[in-house]
Image (cartoon, helix red, strand yellow):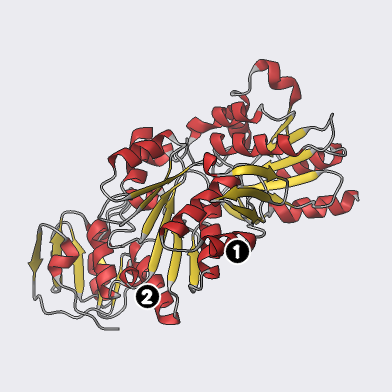
Amino acid sequence: MLARVDASEVARGDYRVSGTTNVEITDVTHDSRTVQRGAMFCCVRGEERDGHDFAVQAVHSGASALLVEREVSGVEVTQVVVRDVRRAMGYVAAAFHQHPSRELTVVGVTGTNGKTTTAQMLGAILTQSGKRTSVFGTLTGARTTPEAPELQRTLASERAKGTTAVVMEVSSHALALQRVAGMQFAAAVFTNLGHDHLDFHRTHDAYFAAKASLFSPDYTTLAVINRDDSYGRKIADSATVPVVTFGRDDATDVTVDASQAQFTWRKTRVRCGIGGDFNVLNALAAATAAASLGTSVSDVVSGLAAVGRIPGRFENVNAGGAFAVIVDYAHTPEALRNVLASARALRSASRARVTVVFGCGGDRDPSKRAEMGAAATAADNIIVTSDNPRHESPQAIIDAIVAGIPSAERAKTIVEVDRRQAMSRAIADARRGDVIVIAGRGHETMQSVAGREVPFDDAAVARELLGATS
């Protein structure tokens, strides 16, 4: 594909062009290893590497233009000099692919918890309403939100296939790193803000600012906000685009079990095929966003009814068994508290117990580990184990978690470094009416240990262990 991209559109502000302005490009990339003849290479500065250092290599590989923050010497190609390559890269990628988000109904979903579930629910609703819909996020890629060139390429491909609507998760990393620059969302949804990613953002204020940046005319024409969340109310109060809010009190006559939730919304009975009391709010987020885009109540109801298993999202892997085994992605203190509260409501015998098996990821925000330990005390039994230790010591991570468990609660706490053994102990000890929650990894099928990726699927392992004990 050949395209001419206007430098003023690329830069969206101050810029300077060195070389000819009459240049055609065949691709947009920030990865020097993927440069093809005629590509524009974007010299992104990262924490460890600076793309400017790879510019000469990119030109030797065939790049016909460079997007830079400082002019690179020793090359004879067009250079567009801008203040922020990351931001400009989003606009050039969008322009190169002829702005696919302008021709699709694109909805972005952001928040600490609930993005995946809300996005999947909204996708089901839009599909039911007759839109050819794709959903992108944690379940579909290595990154929740891909870098701008990949994102725009994907949207262009969807447009070419006849897709008319896209629901995508938008991470705080993506917003801070300008991955969605150049996007135009029909609506942006805010689920909540909790404790996560401070290893990247450093402060909670910076984390919130990244999330809040989505709700501006630069990105969206409509904000759909959770008014039950204090940060949601801040966004709603300061937003410069139209705002629609949702909250738990929009649902009445709520009944929830391990596999579904039912409630009344806008005078209509709704059934959603995923359990967990906290998922009612996710369903309301999806319903409100869809309705705000013109979807009928009947299509909202039909769409939510079509929602079934969402991998690793309050997934009951022992349906019909004597006790429930719930696999959930809960990896923040708020999410763990929500899952355990829902689990307590599911106990089907007077002396039934809730057991939680969980850990924390290595090479990630260490400040939340003690908070995760404190959140786990809502369970009757606690088994602290490995999550994805990555390059850290599993035992050191566990020690940090246990430090957050009050001394009075330590008697109900077991430490088992091996995740499979931890799950096995929980299942072997379960009795009728109990609820086991296996938290933290959800849909993930690989476990990162000491720099290696080891096959480990919580749901599959749980089913295997359940089969061995039946």
Q: What residue appears at the point 31 percent right and 69 percent down from the top-left corner? A: 102
Compared across the picture, whether 375 is left or right of 181 comes to right
Of labels 2 and 1, earlier in sequence is 2
Splitting the image into 4 quarters, where does residue 346 fall? top right
Extreme-right residue of the structure: 470
Choose between 403 and 311: the one closer to the eye. Answer: 311
In the rendering, at what x and y percent does residue 336 appear?
Answer: 60, 37
- Quadrant that contains the N terminus: bottom left
Of the residues shown, which amino acid type is indicated by label 1?
Ser
Residue beneath label 2, please? 156
| Observer-nearest of 323 and 87 | 323
Q: Element at badge 1?
A: helix
Spot occupied by residue 290 in the image (x, y as percentages of width and height): 46, 59
**Circle nearer the viewer, 2 or 1:** 1
How far is mark 2 from mark 1, CA to CA? 29 Å
At x 20% / y 76%, what residue is drawn? 64
**From what the image shows, is residue 354 above or below residue 90?**
above
- Reply above or below: 353 against 188: above
Extreme residue toward the front, this view: 267
Q: Nearer the viewer, residue 443 or 278?
A: 278
Left or right? Give the position of 187 relative to 71: right
Q: Which mark is residue 302?
A: 1
Residue 416 in view here:
no
Residue 93 in picture, x, y percent from top left: 28, 69
